[in-house]
């Protein structure tokens, strides 16, 4: 913490001194964090993003990135972060009880440990979210979402081997305004969201927003006739303050509190093994203790989950004329308490259950500077500091008592720079490097499983090189080389035995074009990843204990391609869609059961995925109509939970259809109907094979739901 406090003081002094020393800057120059997304066109690539720590139009960013404005998310009915996977090529999220696995282009992390990290880094208003379940939540009052694909080892560094998800809140303005809606629908859903923007003084404004959703759950426990599994129960509030301290310095602050008492992803039941040679048949318990069907299950321990999180940030942005500088401090506080049935039946002969509690507090500090982009030579540079303290307690009753009590501390320091030079008016080269140091320590006191303490330290240099060709003002091509690094960690279930870091090398090339008088935007790329020492979790029931190992596989290769586009057809019609192809192969991984995964695809890496959306907008006098349909399909893929057997932990291909209709009236009131999974497709959200538990663990995605909303804007 001394390092963070010193860096905070030194960086603040540097920014304040530089800003005070300059002449009055151009009032048009906006700091990166305050980038506006006023062009919310659904048919061009002109959303303003800050993926490269500076404000740029999406169509001019030489990276594989998918971005959506808040208006685009609303028109597609995106209410939760997990919904992003239905509209973002290459993104897949899998709920696994206490954790959430996020994959981008097949790079994911299935390790559950407080001394381990996700492979996709998620940020809210520039603050890194340290625990993977903090990714889950409501997307309300959002300015935009950016999904960066491939390793982002230079500008983002730690835990971005798969990519980055940036969530940017709506920022305050100097105009009194607001919006909101109330809704209701299937399974007793009640939902509400509201936002109020208010100027306080000249140059200072605040924005307050909130969200609430509750339903009865779509999976019923027949043991007590309740309908409380896979239930939504969340409330969240956010405040954002913006103050223009001077003509050159802007202050931002964000505070968000979320209380999530839902248990979506916990409606597990036993499902029979597939009819394959060598696999068990039937269940270990009698039929009266088993599920009736995937939506009507039986268990004798209730599924209870409560997650509370706080995310706060404070930042200073300074317009230095020749560059913009930024200092951002972030703090997160995450707490989770869970109770779950782990024999997945109501058989009194078992009665197994698990209690888990997690606490995490993290502080981050980043100082950055970016040139204004007006000359041939440009740069972005910064320093980053991170510290987390965490505590995890796990208690299991599996024909005996098992417990683990772990205290952990994780630290990271990094420095980075990217330099670019325009060789000609159309050809630009870029080089970048980040140096990162990490250290982790953990101490576990256990019953049955071994106790122990461990400590590890790592350092890594991750480079980037890129060449960009602006063939015409509307057509850009690029080739990119980048590396990503994710630190190793400690496995509390093996006396804090360490596992090694993983590294990804990325070669990708892409084209972005805006054509047909801005009616057609296309983004295409091809890529190849060399993936070394990837961290993999393998779990199996042995005797009275669930044994978990974390190993480094030898390597993996991912080769693929991606294309997405938006087309304004005319007459109020528009189309959008995307297609992703992944050919992934795992090498050098044999699990503890002796099953060889060589040449098997990586988990959460379907070979094919595509989405197609259509929208119709029309005005009838002073009434506006919007109709929209979205179809998403992905081919078969492996789940990431246990890596017990690739024959059983596999999802067949499936597709989901969402529909929406909205009428907006002249008084800015609107009514809206949303239909999700309207074909009522039954699909597994997760399958886990413990081979010793009675059948496969199976959790299923939401059935068809219908929601109606009434909303307003002013």
Image (cartoon, rainbow, N blue to C red):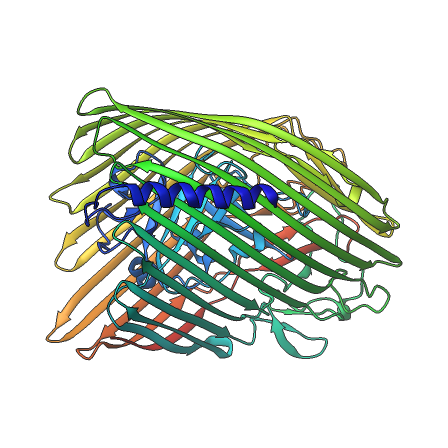
Q: Position of residue 241 (x, y in %)?
A: 38, 63
Which corner quadrant holds the C terminus?
A: bottom left
Q: Residue 322 versus residue 668: which sits nearer the camera?
A: 322
Q: Using residue 416 as the reference point, say whether residue 513 is left or right of it.
A: left
Q: Residue 512 versus residue 194: which sits nearer the camera?
A: 194
Q: Using residue 269 as the reference point, say whether residue 189 is left or right of it.
A: left
How many numbered discs? Answer: 0
Q: Is residue 369 depicted above or below 391 in this figure? A: above
Is residue 317 in view from this perspective? yes
Q: Residue 580 versus residue 238: which sits nearer the camera?
A: 238
Q: Position of residue 364 (x, y in %)?
A: 53, 47
Residue at image coords 80%, 41%:
453
- Quadrant position of residue 710: bottom left
Q: Using residue 228 as the reference point, say whether residue 80 is left or right of it.
A: left
Q: Using residue 86 as the reference point, say whether residue 693 is left or right of it.
A: right
Q: Residue 22 versus residue 64: which sits nearer the camera?
A: 22
Q: Is residue 107 depicted above or below 689 in this figure? A: above
Q: Is residue 209 depicted above or below 544 in this figure? A: below
Is residue 90 in view from this perspective? no
Q: Is residue 476 depicted above or below 543 in this figure? A: above
Residue at image coords 84%, 49%:
445
Q: Position of residue 323 (x, y in %)?
A: 29, 38
């Amino acid at each position: 913490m001394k390092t963070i406090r010193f860096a905070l003081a030194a960086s603040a002094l540097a920014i304040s001194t530089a800003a005070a020393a300059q002449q009055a800057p151009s009032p048009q120059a906006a700091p990166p964090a305050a980038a506006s997304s006023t062009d919310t066109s659904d048919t061009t690539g002109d959303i303003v993003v800050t993926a490269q720590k500076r404000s740029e139009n999406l169509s001019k960013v030489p990276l594989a990135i998918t971005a959506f404005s808040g208006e685009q998310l609303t028109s597609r009915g995106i209410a939760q972060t997990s919904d992003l996977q239905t509209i973002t090529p290459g993104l897949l999220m899998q709920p696994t009880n206490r954790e959430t696995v996020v994959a981008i282009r097949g790079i994911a992390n299935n390790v559950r440990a407080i001394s381990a990290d996700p492979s996709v880094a998620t940020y809210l208003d520039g603050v890194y979210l340290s625990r993977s379940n903090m990714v889950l939540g409501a997307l309300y009052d959002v300015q935009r979402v950016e999904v960066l694909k491939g390793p982002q080892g230079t500008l983002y560094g730690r835990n971005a081997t798969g990519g980055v998800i940036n969530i940017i809140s709506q920022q305050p303005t100097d105009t009194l305004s607001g919006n909101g809606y109330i809704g209701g629908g299937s399974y007793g859903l009640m939902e509400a969201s509201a936002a109020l923007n208010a100027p306080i003084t000249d140059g200072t404004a605040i924005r307050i927003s909130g969200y609430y959703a509750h339903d009865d759950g779509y999976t019923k426990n027949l043991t007590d006739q309740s309908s409380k599994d896979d239930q939504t129960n969340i409330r969240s509030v956010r405040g954002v303050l913006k103050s223009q301290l001077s003509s050159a310095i802007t202050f931002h602050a964000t505070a968000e509190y979320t209380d999530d008492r839902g248990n979506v992803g916990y409606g597990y039941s036993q499902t029979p093994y597939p009819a394959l040679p060598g696999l068990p048949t039937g269940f270990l318990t009698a039929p009266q203790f088993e599920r009736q069907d995937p939506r009507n299950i039986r268990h004798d321990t209730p599924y209870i989950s409560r997650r509370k999180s706080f995310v706060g940030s404070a930042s200073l942005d300074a317009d230095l004329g020749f560059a913009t500088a930024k200092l951002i401090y972030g703090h997160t506080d995450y707490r989770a308490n869970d109770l779950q049935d782990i024999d997945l039946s109501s058989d009194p002969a078992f009665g197994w259950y698990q209690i888990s509690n997690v606490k995490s507090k993290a502080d981050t500090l980043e100082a950055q500077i970016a040139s204004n982009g007006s000359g041939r030579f440009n740069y972005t540079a910064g320093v980053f500091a991170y510290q987390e303290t965490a505590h995890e307690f796990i208690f299991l009753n599996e024909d005996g008592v098992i417990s683990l009590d772990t205290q952990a501390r994780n630290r990271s320091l990094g420095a980075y720079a990217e330099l670019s030079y325009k060789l000609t008016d159309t050809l630009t080269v870029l080089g970048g490097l980040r140096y990162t140091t990490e250290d982790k320590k953990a101490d576990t006191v256990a019953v049955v499983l071994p106790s122990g303490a461990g400590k590890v330290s790592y350092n890594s240099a991750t480079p980037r090189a890129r060449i960009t060709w602006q063939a015409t003002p509307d057509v850009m091509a690029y080739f990119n080389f980048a590396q990503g690094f994710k630190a190793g960690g400690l496995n509390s279930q093996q006396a804090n035995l360490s596992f090694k870091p993983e590294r990804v090398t990325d070669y990708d090339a892409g084209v972005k074009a805006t054509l047909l008088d801005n009616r057609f935007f296309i983004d295409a790329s091809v890529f190849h990843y060399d993936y070394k020492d990837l961290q993999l979790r393998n779990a199996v029931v042995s005797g009275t204990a669930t044994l978990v190992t974390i190993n480094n596989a030898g390597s993996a290769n991912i080769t693929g391609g991606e294309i997405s586009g938006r087309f304004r057809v005319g007459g109020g019609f528009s189309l959008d869609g995307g297609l992703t192809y992944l050919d992934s192969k795992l090498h050098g991984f044999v699990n503890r059961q002796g099953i060889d995964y060589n040449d098997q695809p990586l988990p959460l890496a379907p070979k094919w995925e595509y989405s197609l959306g259509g929208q119709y907008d029309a005005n009838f006098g002073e009434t506006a109509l919007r109709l929209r349909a979205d179809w998403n399909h992905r081919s078969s893929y492996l789940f990431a939970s246990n890596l017990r057997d690739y024959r059983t932990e596999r999802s067949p291909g499936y597709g989901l259809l969402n529909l929406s209709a909205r009428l907006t009236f002249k008084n800015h009131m609107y009514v809206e109907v949303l239909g999700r999974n309207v074909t009522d497709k039954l699909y597994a959200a997760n399958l886990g094979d413990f081979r010793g538990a009675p059948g496969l663990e199976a959790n299923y995605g939401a059935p068809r739901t219908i929601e109606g909303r009434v909303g307003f804007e002013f």
